[in-house]
């Protein structure tokens, strides 16, 4: 691990002003915010992250969960994943979020990891984590050995010829299906970014993973008011029953009025270079009967753009069946 | 490994500086006792506990948050000490295995691990017990499957899992 200066900013203003001095907020940032540390410290030990300054923002009072005036939920940046998952209102009104968070990591890590930290969680691609290997995400222009190498667990949606790393988050998948909004305070003021627009596709700049710029501090995430009568389900398929990243996962938020689906939110995990909301699958189901044929058609639509690599073609059918099963479970709940 | 014992370190700029130059003061409260220390900012909570404070009950396994051997309690909740910076934990109430019980006066969970033979080599046991004690205060279903799910962050390469679950269930049933 490289040396760094450990700083505990007195307030948000100081945190933002100091962070704004960083050359980038993306890979290679020389100033990093520290929350739970479950990603950052791990990557600093591997010398994948080498910040010169580490800003501890754990004590900036960003750890509250409150009801918004619209009846939604405001989740502070440093709310721990376990506190979010077990929060009464999340369990009752946004249960897909509880399910997603509890399907990820371990109890210890969920006690440390935070809302904002999970939003900027880094890929588990082995080449990204190994500084002896080339990696366009870690060192732009060096190449992507995953494309011809070990890629069984990597992405099939949103990939480019420069990067096929998948986003490992479960929480973000549920937030995508729930249409969460990320609130950022930066040097120029505040802005609100829908979770679907927060993460970037790799394209030819895989080192840029989010819209964050130097000085940008995620202060909180808001969830819209609960969708009345919605059935919610998160299904995660993986190599082990617990404490493992998804090969494919699906978050479903569904309301059925009479025969037909009146509201549908669908997002996939494990298969995309970003948390993968599927407007294609939603369009298939919106206003249609909740039946097996339509569910399968939605799954086909969700995976239509999939581009498998040498070792992960199985993920296409796995993700389809994952989504169908999640839809059936939600519909019958 | 612990950076506090290295005589020299290399900075990001490539210059060499002595460890004492970059060491910073911190006070940690571990098992009810205050420790005033000077540490390299890079020191993890795990290395600080083991190498600086010399409480070696907490074990280093993978050092990357994948095995659970380093599990301790911070403010009553279980966390991985290998993924925490010691500097981020001043003012926090830190509990290690040494703070749970003694050979003469064991914590009920320690006694249950002994009674159920819930270990073989023992290397993961400290982390297993710290996780198990924390689990008693977490939302956890009553069946073995719920215990297994919430203990999945603690790996046991000897495979003592069945007896670990039995020990935890024994304590939960007596509570």
Image: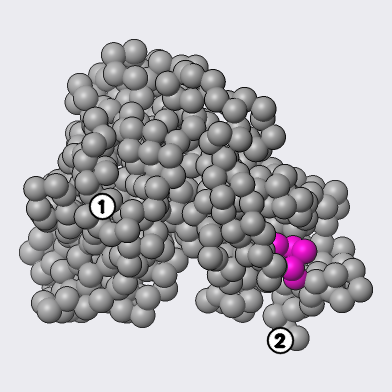
Image mark for residue B175: 2
Judging depth in this view, the residue of A248 and A163 nearest the camera is A163
Q: Residue at x 38, y 62 (%)?
A: A59
Q: Quadrant of residue A251?
A: bottom left
Percent coordinates x, y for residue A18 in the rendering? 27, 44
Question: Is residue A12 shown in magenta?
Answer: no
- The chain holding disc 1 is A
Please state if B72 lies on the left or on the right of B161 as rendered.
left
| Mark 2 crowd level (few <14, some 14–19, many ≥20, 10 Å Cα) | few
Q: Which residue is mark 1?
A: A14
Quarter of the image for the C terminus of chain B: give it: bottom right
Magenta segment range?
B96-100
Quarter of the image for the N terminus of chain B: give it: top right
Circle nearer the viewer, 1 or 2: 1
Image mark for residue B164: none
Whether residue A226 is visible here, answered yes or no, is no
Percent coordinates x, y for residue B42 in the rendering? 54, 39
- The chain holding disc 2 is B
Q: CA distance from mark 1 to mark 2?
A: 47 Å
């Amino acid at each position: 691990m490289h040396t760094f200066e450990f700083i505990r900013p007195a307030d948000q203003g100081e945190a933002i002003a100091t962070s704004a001095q960083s050359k980038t907020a993306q890979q290679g940032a020389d100033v990093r915010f520290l929350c739970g540390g479950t990603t950052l410290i791990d990557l600093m030990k591997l010398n994948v992250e080498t910040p010169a300054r580490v800003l501890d923002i754990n004590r900036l009072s960003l750890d509250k969960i409150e009801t918004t005036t619209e009846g939604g939920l405001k989740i502070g940046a440093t709310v721990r994943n376990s506190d979010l998952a077990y929060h009464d209102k999340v369990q009752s009104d946004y249960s897909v979020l509880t399910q997603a968070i509890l399907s990820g990591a371990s109890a210890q890590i969920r006690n440390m990891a935070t809302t904002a930290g999970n939003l900027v969680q880094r890929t588990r691609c082995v080449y990204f984590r190994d500084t002896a290997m080339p990696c366009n995400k870690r060192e732009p222009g060096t190449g992507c050995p995953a494309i011809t190498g070990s890629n069984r667990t990597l992405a099939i949606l949103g990939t480019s010829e420069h990067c096929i790393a998948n986003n490992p988050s479960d929480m973000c998948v549920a937030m995508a299906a729930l249409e969460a909004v990320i609130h950022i305070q930066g040097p120029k003021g505040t802005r609100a970014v829908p979770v679907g627009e927060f993460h970037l596709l790799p394209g030819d700049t895989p080192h840029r993973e989010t819209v964050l710029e130097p000085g940008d501090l995620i202060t909180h995430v808001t969830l819209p008011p609960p969708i009345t009568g919605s059935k919610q389900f998160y299904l995660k398929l993986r190599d082990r029953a617990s404490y493992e990243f998804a090969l494919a996962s699906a978050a479903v938020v569904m309301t059925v009025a009479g025969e037909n689906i009146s509201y549908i939110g669908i997002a996939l995990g494990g298969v995309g270079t970003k948390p993968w909301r599927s407007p294609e699958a939603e369009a298939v189901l919106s206003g249609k009967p909740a039946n097996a044929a339509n569910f399968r058609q939605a799954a086909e639509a969700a995976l239509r753009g999939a581009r498998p690599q040498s070792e992960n073609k199985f993920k296409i059918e796995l993700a389809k069946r994952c989504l169908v099963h999640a839809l059936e479970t939600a519909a019958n709940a | 490994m612990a950076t506090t014992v290295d005589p020299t370190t290399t900075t990001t700029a490539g210059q060499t500086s002595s460890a004492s130059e970059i060491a910073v003061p911190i006070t940690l409260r571990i098992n009810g006792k205050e420790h005033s220390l000077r540490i390299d900012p890079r020191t993890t909570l795990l290395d600080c506990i083991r190498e600086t404070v010399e409480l070696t009950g907490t074990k280093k396994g993978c050092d990357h948050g994948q095995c659970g051997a380093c599990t301790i309690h911070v403010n009553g909740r279980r966390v991985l000490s290998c993924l925490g910076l010691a500097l981020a934990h001043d003012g926090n109430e830190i509990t290690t295995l040494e703070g749970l019980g003694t050979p003469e006066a064991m914590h009920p969970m320690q006694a249950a691990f002994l009674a159920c033979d819930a270990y073989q080599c023992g290397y993961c046991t400290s982390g297993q017990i710290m996780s198990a004690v924390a689990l008693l205060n977490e939302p956890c279903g009553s069946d073995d499957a719920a215990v297994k799910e919430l203990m999945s962050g603690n790996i046991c390469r000897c495979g003592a899992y069945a007896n670990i679950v039995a020990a935890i269930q024994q304590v939960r049933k007596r509570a």
